[in-house]
Image: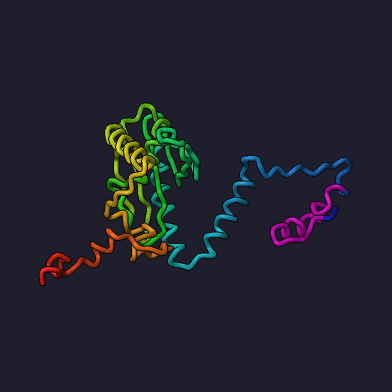
Amino acid sequence: MVERFSASQAGRHMSCHASANLEKAIIGYVPPVEDRTADNAANRGSDMHEDLARIMRHPTKDVQMLAKCLEYVAELRGRRRFKVLVEQKVNATWLIGDPETTVDLVLYTADEIHVIDWKTGRIPVWVTDNEQLMYYAVCFAHLAPKAKGVTTHIVQPWANNIDWQWLSTDDLKKFMVEAQRAQREILAGDVTFGPSHHCTFCPANPHMRGARGSETCPAMMQILYPSVVDEAEILDL
């Protein structure tokens, strides 16, 4: 079968016509079987081309931000021969119901582990005491049995926010106990309001930038629009 005269093969075909039809040119020639599942240079190259093509569809500013993400992680990965987990699913077996969660990136050795969370929004999400990252850290800490803690990272260049925090095993145990208690209380029917910085992304927040529910949170409404005159004062008039 004559090989297609493509851009990538043009030079070879022009130099060696036989290379365009090796089955005819060489008696008994059998072409190699292409294995797209193999871990080889050709397949890695194809995958990288696909990744680059997806990245280049983004606006220039986003490409620059993605480059910062890659630069940060590349520097981190270059420090040691880490094992790498990408978009890894895991069950939080320490919680009731073993809920499944997915982490963006984990780098680990027997005595060191890093949990990285990509953020593409423009509202900064701080790494300090970040419950989402602590949740991931508890789930994956067992991969580094000799480590004395987990380093968590937020990589959010769109908000000029790339930072890390080291959490000791005691920090993670404290978080785990508090999370387990909160889950038990919620499952028991507790619906106590607790306004905090987490309200930013709650669908009941009247200032939520994403999808909002049909009713707003009364606790947030009281914080945002406190009553100027107390009801009892009105009745006394």
Q: Nearer the viewer, residue 172 or 46?
A: 172
Query: From the viewer's perspective, is residue 82 above or below residue 14?
Result: above
Q: Does 20 lie within the magenta span?
A: yes
Query: From the viewer's perspective, is residue 47 above or below residue 14?
Result: above
Residue 82 in sight in this render: no
Q: Position of residue 107 (x, y in %)?
A: 43, 39
Q: Which residue is drawn at the image coordinates 39% and 44% (left, top)?
A: 76
State the image quarter where residue 27 is shown.
top right
Q: Does 97 lie within the magenta span?
A: no
Q: Nearer the viewer, residue 53 or 28?
A: 53
Figure quadrant of the C terminus: bottom left
Q: Position of residue 35 (x, y in %)?
A: 70, 42
Q: Nearer the viewer, residue 92 or 96?
A: 96
Q: Position of residue 125 (x, y in %)?
A: 33, 55
Q: Which residue is drawn at the image coordinates 74% and 61% (left, top)?
A: 6
Magenta-tinted stretch? 3-23
